[in-house]
């Protein structure tokens, strides 16, 4: 039964994959409660999340998924399928390492190269659900000179900006792992590391510190986690509570025609215009859901201007 679902999904997107030269895509995402797995394809590799459920064992779930994938991709090698158990995570756990095999590959998206780690962390190094967001962003930053990428993760928005003519990018993240990963991506794409800098810092500290400087940016990306209890933060981060501070403080560093792209994957998120200093706000969430993602609530994306 799982095979039938993923075969149907693949048939529905296969022509799009070939036409757009998509190397990394979501094949299946828990559409049927009987099969609580998410399946992502990265070139010749498959990355699978197995979600813990009371009514099915992880071993059985992996076995069912393995059979379905080998039916669909008859030539796939078992060693090219990577499984991770997705338990209920502690806040900030995306930074935790749980393997050390260092299985790293390179994929391309819109002529930009990304290092993907299939084994060592919960996430692989790129958020596939933001593929269309990055595509929209690539058009918005054309002609811009400086962008700031907060909670930059492995630097995807910075790479997108740089490859679309932005001269200077600043990526900020408090994880040393992801900062080094972002630097690797910068070198991978043969970008100048002196023009495309990565700063390891708590975003809140960073914003306070640059108030003493005359820094201005043409575009600011804010894509924070939903929650974090990292020891590097003075207090628990909560997206619903803290988003207005992030947007309002960041807006102080916008150039006269500057814009902010704000995104969150918190499903219950409520945007309250009245507490935001920027009054030109546009919800573009529906425009940013890729063809291979069926869940319209996978993320929310807003564009803000002065």
Image (spheres, helix red, strand yellow):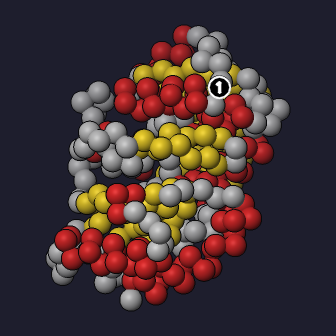
Give the side of residue 36 with respect to residue 17, left or right. left
Residue 204 image point, x, y percent = 43, 27
- The residue that disc 1 covers is 190
Q: Nearer the viewer, residue 282 or 64?
A: 64
Is 292 situated left or right of 231 in this image? right
Rendered image quadrant of residue 95: top left
| Extreme residue toward the right, this view | 143
Considering only vertical position in the picture, is 129 above or below 98?
below
Q: Position of residue 180 (x, y in %)?
A: 43, 26
What residue is rendered at 40% in x and 67% in y?
A: 38
- In the depicted structure, whether residue 237 falls above or below residue 41: above
On the question of residue 36 being in view, the answer is: yes
Q: How many marks?
A: 1
- The quarter of the picture where the N terminus appears is bottom left
> In the rendering, at what x and y percent does residue 222 appear?
54, 39
Q: Is residue 215 above or below residue 146?
A: above
Residue located at (43% from left, 79% from top): 71
Image spot of residue 169 (x, y percent):
64, 25
Residue 250, visible in the rendered structure = no
Label 1: few (<14), some or many (≥20) within 10 Å? Answer: few
* Residue 305 versus residue 286 in the image, above or below: above
- Tell me the quarter of the picture where residue 213 sits: top right
Residue visible at 56% across and 47% down?
107
The residue lying toward the viewer, choosing from 211 and 56, is: 56
The quadrant the C terminus occupies is top right
- Left or right: 286 as drawn, with respect to 299: right
Depth check, front residue: 290 or 246: 290
Q: Is residue 80 left or right of residue 286?
A: left
Looking at the rendered structure, the secondary structure element under dot 1 is loop
Q: Residue at x 74, y 65 (%)?
A: 19
């Amino acid at each position: 039964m799982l095979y039938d679902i993923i075969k149907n999904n693949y048939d529905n997107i296969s022509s799009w994959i070939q036409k757009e030269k998509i190397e990394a895509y979501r094949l299946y995402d828990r559409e049927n409660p009987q099969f609580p797995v998410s399946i992502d394809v990265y070139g010749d590799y498959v990355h699978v999340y197995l979600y813990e459920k009371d009514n099915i064992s992880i071993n059985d779930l992996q076995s069912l998924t393995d059979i379905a994938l080998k039916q669909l991709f008859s030539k796939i090698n078992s060693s090219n399928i990577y499984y991770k158990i997705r338990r209920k995570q502690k806040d900030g756990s995306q930074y935790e390492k749980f393997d050390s095999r260092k299985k790293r590959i390179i994929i391309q998206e819109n002529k930009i190269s990304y290092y993907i780690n299939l084994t060592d962390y919960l996430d692989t190094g790129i958020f596939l659900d933001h593929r269309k967001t990055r595509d929209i962003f690539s058009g918005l930053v054309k002609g811009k000179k400086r962008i700031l990428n907060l909670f930059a993760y492995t630097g995807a928005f910075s790479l997108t900006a740089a490859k679309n003519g932005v001269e200077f990018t600043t990526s900020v993240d408090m994880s040393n792992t992801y900062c080094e990963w972002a630097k690797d991506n910068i070198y991978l794409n043969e970008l100048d590391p002196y023009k495309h800098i990565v700063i390891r810092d708590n975003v809140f500290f960073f914003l306070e510190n640059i108030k003493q400087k005359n820094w201005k940016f043409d575009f600011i990306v804010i894509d924070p986690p939903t929650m974090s209890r990292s020891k590097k933060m003075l207090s628990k981060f909560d997206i619903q509570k803290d988003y207005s501070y992030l947007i309002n403080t960041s807006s102080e560093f916008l150039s006269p025609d500057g814009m902010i792209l704000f995104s969150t994957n918190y499903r219950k998120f409520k945007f309250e215009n009245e507490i935001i200093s920027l009054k030109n706000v546009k919800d573009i969430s529906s425009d940013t859901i890729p063809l291979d993602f069926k869940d319209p609530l996978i993320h929310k994306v807003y564009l803000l201007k002065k």
